[in-house]
């Protein structure tokens, strides 16, 4: 690392971008992922240097970052190339709510904003507890969360946890424990058998088509389909493991289940 705390940070996923803005440390950001949309002004204020599984390495190097922040094994090839080129990289890998809160605290410490990060994380913890307490006063509807349609992939752990906090019951809680998408594949027969009351879908950047879900063979008798309880949650709100999921993502689930 060139400097500590780092003065020039490149964020290759959106959750670290939003966190730094919330901490008031956005001046340190010199490059972002093309998927970064929170807060809205980031698209005008910061140069885009990457998608998710690909990055413009020469553009990143030209920014002379003190550190590059990445997420998950899906960016492993980018991380390897940057490290080979002598760039300091921090690879986060949070897959649940506890991990999201730990990322916020760690990132705060990295930029010298420990107190603000602790306050932010504690605020989220209080909010989650308050929502869970109110939601659990009624019978929970069963929920199938679909992260992708072909093949069908059910939600990861932080999504499953947010469904529970919002007052629902994930029909595949054991699969949610699996970190890799390939280990969260489900069959049409499994969903039919589970008979969810609600279907939530977020197709990772692609618009969800409820009518396509409803027309799947054998799904006509699923309660969620019969009662037209199929809803999309925008991927920017729920599929990034950061503040968006704990706030607007949770609120979107809560509104649908209420």
Image: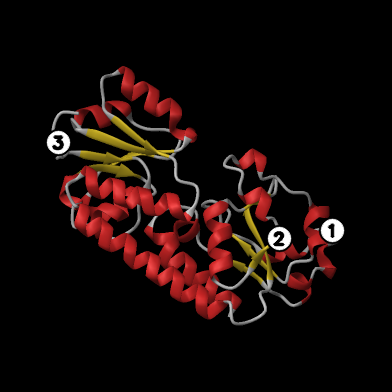
Which residue was labeled with disc 2? 171
**Sooner in the amino-acid sequence: mark 1 or mark 3:** 3
Q: Which mark is residue 217?
A: 1
Q: Earlier in the sequence, mark 2 or mark 3?
A: 3
| x and y percentages locating residue 136 in the rendered image | 58, 77
| Residue 48, picture quadrant | top left
Tell me which residue sits at (78%, 72%) in the image: 223
Residue at 61% x, 69% y is 231
Which residue position is annotated with label 3? 4
Q: Residue at x 45, y 45 (%)?
A: 94
Q: Secondary structure at mark 2?
A: loop
Q: Quadrant of the C terminus?
A: bottom right
Task: Name the mark nearer the viewer: 1 or 3.
Answer: 3
Q: Is residue 68 left or right of residue 240?
A: left
Q: Quadrant of residue 110?
A: top left
Q: Nearer the viewer, residue 134 or 34?
A: 134
Q: Residues within 10 Å of mark 2 (few under 14, many from 20)?
A: many
């Amino acid at each position: 690392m060139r400097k500590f705390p780092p003065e020039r940070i490149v964020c290759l996923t959106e959750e670290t971008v939003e966190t730094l803005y919330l901490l008031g440390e956005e001046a340190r950001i010199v490059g972002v992922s093309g998927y970064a949309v929170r807060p809205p002004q980031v698209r005008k204020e910061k140069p885009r240097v990457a998608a998710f599984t690909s990055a413009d390495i020469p553009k990143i190097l030209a920014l002379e970052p003190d550190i590059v922040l990445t997420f998950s094994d899906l960016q492993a090839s980018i991380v390897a190339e940057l490290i080979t080129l002598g760039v300091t990289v921090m690879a986060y890998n949070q897959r649940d709510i506890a991990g999201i809160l730990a990322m916020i605290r760690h990132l705060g410490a990295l930029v010298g904003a420990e107190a603000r990060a602790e306050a932010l994380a504690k605020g989220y913890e209080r909010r989650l507890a308050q929502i869970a307490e109110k939601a659990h006063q009624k019978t929970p509807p069963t929920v199938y969360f679909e992260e992708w349609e072909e093949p069908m992939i059910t939600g990861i752990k932080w999504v499953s946890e947010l469904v529970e906090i919002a007052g629902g019951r994930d029909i595949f809680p054991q699969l949610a424990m699996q970190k890799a998408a390939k280990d969260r594949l489900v069959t049409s027969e499994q969903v039919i058998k589970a008979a969810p009351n609600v279907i939530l879908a977020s197709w990772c950047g692609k618009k969800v088509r409820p009518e396509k879900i409803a027309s799947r063979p054998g799904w006509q008798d699923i309660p969620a389909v019969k009662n037209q309880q199929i809803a999309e949650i925008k991927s920017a709100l729920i599929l990034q493991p950061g503040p968006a999921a704990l706030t607007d993502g949770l609120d979107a689930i809560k509104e649908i289940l209420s």
